[in-house]
Amino acid sequence: MTINSPVILAVELGPLRLKNPVMVASGTFGYGQEYAALVPLENLGGVVVKGISLEPRSGNPPPRIWETCGGMLNSIGLQNVGLQTFLREKLPHLRPLQVPVIVNLFGNTVEEYGELAAGLDGHEGIDALEINISCPNVKAGGMAFGSDPKMVFQVVSAVRSRTNLPVITKLTPNVTDITLPAKAAEDAGTDILSLINTVAGMAVDPQTRRPRLGNVVGGLSGPAIKPIALRMVWQVIQASNLPVIGLGGIVSVEDALEFLIIGAKAIQVGTANFVNPQVTLDIISGLEDYLRQQGLRDINQIIGTLEVAR
Amino acid sequence: MTINSPVILAVELGPLRLKNPVMVASGTFGYGQEYAALVPLENLGGVVVKGISLEPRSGNPPPRIWETCGGMLNSIGLQNVGLQTFLREKLPHLRPLQVPVIVNLFGNTVEEYGELAAGLDGHEGIDALEINISCPNVKAGGMAFGSDPKMVFQVVSAVRSRTNLPVITKLTPNVTDITLPAKAAEDAGTDILSLINTVAGMAVDPQTRRPRLGNVVGGLSGPAIKPIALRMVWQVIQASNLPVIGLGGIVSVEDALEFLIIGAKAIQVGTANFVNPQVTLDIISGLEDYLRQQGLRDINQIIGTLEVAR
Amino acid sequence: MILRNAQILFNKPMSTELYHLGLLCPDIAVSIQPGQFVMVRIRDSFDPLLRRPFAIHRLYPNDPPGSLEILYKVVGKGTRLLTTMQPGNSVNLLGPLGRGFRFPNDNGFVLLVAGGIGIAPLPYLAETLAAHKHKGPFVLWFGGKTSGDLVCVQHFKDLGFAVEIVTEDGSIGRKGLVTEHLEPWLIQQDELPKVIYSCGPYPMQRSIAEMAARLRISSQLSMEALMGCGVGACLSCSLRCRPPQGAADPHYANVCQNGPVFDGEEIIWE
Amino acid sequence: MILRNAQILFNKPMSTELYHLGLLCPDIAVSIQPGQFVMVRIRDSFDPLLRRPFAIHRLYPNDPPGSLEILYKVVGKGTRLLTTMQPGNSVNLLGPLGRGFRFPNDNGFVLLVAGGIGIAPLPYLAETLAAHKHKGPFVLWFGGKTSGDLVCVQHFKDLGFAVEIVTEDGSIGRKGLVTEHLEPWLIQQDELPKVIYSCGPYPMQRSIAEMAARLRISSQLSMEALMGCGVGACLSCSLRCRPPQGAADPHYANVCQNGPVFDGEEIIWE
Ligand SMILES: Cc1cc2nc3c(=O)[nH]c(=O)nc-3n(C[C@H](O)[C@H](O)[C@H](O)COP(=O)(O)OP(=O)(O)OC[C@H]3O[C@@H](n4cnc5c(N)ncnc54)[C@H](O)[C@@H]3O)c2cc1C
Ligand SMILES: Cc1cc2nc3c(=O)[nH]c(=O)nc-3n(C[C@H](O)[C@H](O)[C@H](O)COP(=O)(O)OP(=O)(O)OC[C@H]3O[C@@H](n4cnc5c(N)ncnc54)[C@H](O)[C@@H]3O)c2cc1C
Ligand SMILES: Cc1cc2nc3c(=O)[nH]c(=O)nc-3n(C[C@H](O)[C@H](O)[C@H](O)COP(=O)(O)O)c2cc1C
Ligand SMILES: Cc1cc2nc3c(=O)[nH]c(=O)nc-3n(C[C@H](O)[C@H](O)[C@H](O)COP(=O)(O)O)c2cc1C
Ligand code: FES
Ligand code: FES
């Protein structure tokens, strides 16, 4: 295997085919345009846009982020332009690109999830839907959807019944047993699972004795949470037959490899985009280098190859 | 308030009185002797010793730790000398010291917890028991005790009925709703709650494609988990009337203050002892400095003073 | 928008808290405008995690070509770490970012206002305005807690600015807050400026905006917010603003993208 | 056990991977024994989080007084970071830690064995043994992947050691592994040493222990393990050992406390 031998990075996740397993995570890459000067979107395995709701949302009062050791808390409050503006103003920029576009969506009720799925269905340029059942920073209901398997089943069923697009269900880590919502989503007909969303957290300013976030509690992301994410992805992979997208704290090709080796078919990069906007490009070329160094030619030869001595 | 005015750091946690709110966490300070050359134990608010079981345990196969971003994973596997050796060889060194000694304990069954409590009761030099219901790295049962409120109730009841010592119940963060085990422990008669224990996590070596830990899954500790710990302590404080000891990722006086401000009556320092063995001394003097700088004279004037705008 | 390693040319303390950081980064130096900023990754590690936003203090086109200067104040973990960096080390820059100061065609009275570290973006602005050949007068009002905060004053004088100083402790100049002294002074001038350019803490910016509204002049205020990405991707850096034309509801603007320089009238003050 | 900031005196690359780090730390220099180690906090940040264990390579009692030297190999995040530290910076040391090499009263044949970076603790050991006025012969067997791994050889020669070199690629000395060549050579010697002192990778240490058992000599092996605390408080650094006298079951020893130097016979090899 020489330094230039071609290697294959393409992966299949049920109905979704990606030219490589490296996507950008919802909420960390805007609607795909913001980083376009630095990251040719067509080089990515996929782009997941900021979560969309039926109506526009103005989000939480600032401050909305706080840096922690190896991570950050956010309580954006799911600010977004709403379905109609997304379709009218954001999607047209993405449509011409040769990159799978995945629309992340969330509702306040089960019905809203269904309506959103219907509203997004049939629009050229959308390749899959990702259901956010897990955002921990919306006060009413946000916590409950993802942590109650019955609600997960309802939400995923509502989306499944209103779209023919591949459906990804994105799980929250704020649960005792991650395999239960995973199973519920599988039973409700999701095609793919992605995890993890942010871990609920908090910070306080000792000088003012006030919470650091306007919303008090927010979601922790970044390298600090990677060991938690990896453990949960591994639990889900052992419990489910569905393809899994792993994310949470990935900042390097080594991190991406950890998720692939335990069996994730693809990964998403979130917070690391802020630290190094070109990190996804580095990871993609790092995967190629790794394969060559290992004398392999196809990324699928390393997916799910964890060796557990026992 | 001048730079030398005396300030009061003493706190009361139900039946437990501490000269200051800064303790060392179980498993990170051995049996109290290991750091004695650097930390006069009598300066501490309390010493929690490594978890004790009825019989000695040899622990998990190495490797037992792995460093992560801002944290570390451990799967020590609750290695310990066992009750009898503890009483015979370890306690006599601690007994003469003017510092509250808290014995952390765990069993494989509800009955074992009760027997341990009985075995520790009545020995001079033990000031409280801390029940570890939460260690995530023992394969059989370890996860279940702490995450099932019914089991928590049984374990705490078993201990409560066999000892007159103050009982602290130490909660696991690996649950959907931390207030449920907290309530169960309260109902079963615990005097104090402490949280959090480690967060279940995992890491993989991309070169060997093996888990970094002999036990595959381990417990994440250190500054990476502080936001999670703080959020959970806050949830428990709002839901319970018991005094709460906050821990998880504390490395500085600012961190300690965050826990006290949200209402923890005391704190424990774990992983940070490895990074800076004298961190507890720094935190204690830092608390004094903070009080002076704020023009206050008693640490109780800042406990539970979080201002939430609303 | 460019991502580049920039070599540190110098890192000089001006006081215990203020440092001049010289960086070699021709690609950014050639395109950045007054009031725009860069996001700095101080080192290749994840503690601290996020980039830190800094304005461009001055450009030095020839010394060496493509060098730029940041003035930073030590306030926390990141800036403390920055003080340990030495010539030869490098930092990573993302920029130019944001919308900088706008220049009206008017050639009259140029008024700048700075509070504390708010002086940071003004030298580059002042040089650019001076180069625009405004008629003048050129005036900088500069407020600080104490005399040590008042750096770079000579540079403004060299550019032809009159510098009016205010300190909270009265250790130099007028005593009190800039905003107390500025309005009475302004009213006594022969003419009013069309625009006030201002950078400083939130309460000062609010007072400037209110004063500008009373005097019916416009204000260009460089605002701060906690930032995740610096490019409009994360929606962290919100500032409540009046609805854009046509829209009904007030909305959150992104300081990094719609600002950092806002027209005082856009902002809904708290 | 002492906790001290130590100023960096020098930080010199010996090859792309190996560095000599000079530190000023009189309190530790005065008390540390050959084979003991220090836990180094490379900088005041939490990434990397844990301290890194390093042996003492040499002491320099007079140059300046109280200085010590570490030989480190760049293998990961912490050691890579260490290469960026400059004279004038400081690191934080915890030490002396662990149980070092023991010296029998015997005055005969002194045999040291090093594999790769396992050379690190041996110069200080060699100096101490030489000062003990052993009769000799003094021999170092030193194995590496390639010639570039073989640093400090001259220093051992200056101390009166014969140095036998083995490289895996045969670029210098014998070709292969130390453990292949050592036993046949030993058997041909007039006498056997009472003890073999060895530091190197796990498989080498195991071979040395097995050879020592065959030849009925004892071995003192400096072992490695991932360490949390370095002082026996966390039980991370386990090494499976034979039961201590009286006890029935094998147990996990702490490398940081019961070692890092173990008698080869104590260890249960995997
Ligand atoms: C557009 C813009 C331009 C700026 N230009 C300058 C400049 O030229 N010179 C200068 O000294 N400062 C400037 N600041 C402020 C500077 O970014 C902060 O002082 C710096 O980020 C503090 O970092 P720290 O790690 O030392 O502080 P910490 O308090 O430890 O930082 C913790 C977190 O809060 C953020 N933060 C803290 N204070 C501020 C602040 N005032 N504004 C935004 N984020 C903050 C940090 O970026 C970090 O994410 C500017 C801010 C903005 C938004
Ligand atoms: C008692 C003792 C003495 C040592 N003396 C020396 C010495 O004199 N010179 C030298 O170059 N090396 C020595 N080592 C090994 C040295 O500690 C590691 O190479 C170093 O910790 C690697 O850190 P890193 O961040 O560069 O590597 P990373 O692989 O990024 O480190 C990740 C984690 O693994 C640990 N680790 C990695 N390799 C080792 C190892 N071989 N042993 C123990 N922990 C490891 C690190 O401490 C850290 O916790 C010694 C180890 C021990 C136990
Ligand atoms: C600022 C920010 C905004 C986010 N917005 C969304 C969102 O709209 N929908 C969603 O499903 N996840 C959202 N997330 C979660 C991320 O997609 C991702 O699951 C999480 O950050 C963990 O990955 P990371 O550690 O790589 O960032 C957001 C995360 C951040 C940091
Ligand atoms: C090496 C290690 C061993 C531990 N052993 C125990 C134990 O025996 N019993 C227990 O209740 N908690 C144990 N813990 C958990 C700590 O007491 C503490 O709850 C956790 O590490 C979080 O705090 P920290 O982030 O300050 O370390 C251990 C933690 C570590 C790192
Ligand atoms: S900092 Fe991310 S949108 Fe402004
Ligand atoms: S490193 Fe903690 S016991 Fe050895």
Image (cartoon, coloured by chain):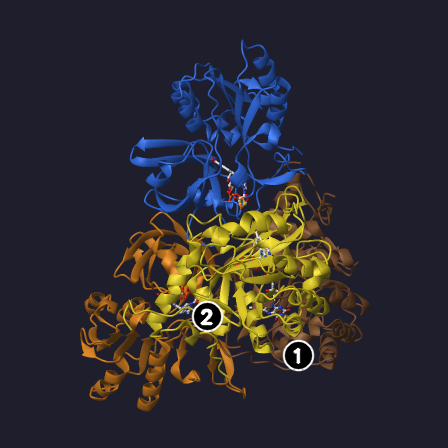
Chain colours: A yellow, B brown, C blue, D orange
Secondary element at tag 2: strand
Q: Is residue C263 visible?
A: yes
Same chain check for tags 1 and 2: no
Q: What residue type is labelled 2?
A: Val
Of tags 1 and 2, which is closer to the observer? 2
Query: Label 1 vs label 2: CA separation?
Result: 38 Å
Q: In this view, does C235 lie above or below C164?
A: below
Report the side of A266 relative to A232 (left or right): left
Report the side of D100 relative to A129 (left or right): left
Q: Which mark is residue A11?
A: 2
- For label 2, count other residues whose C-alpha is less than 10 Å away and answer few (under 14), some (14-19) or many (20+): many
Residue shown at the point (19%, 79%) measured from the top left? D174
| Nearest to the observer: residue B32 or residue B26 | B26
Q: Which mark is residue A213?
A: none
What is the x, y in percent for residue D18? 29, 62
Where does label 1 land, which residue?
A: B141
Q: In this view, does B169 lie above or below D265?
A: above
Which chain's residue wears label 2? A
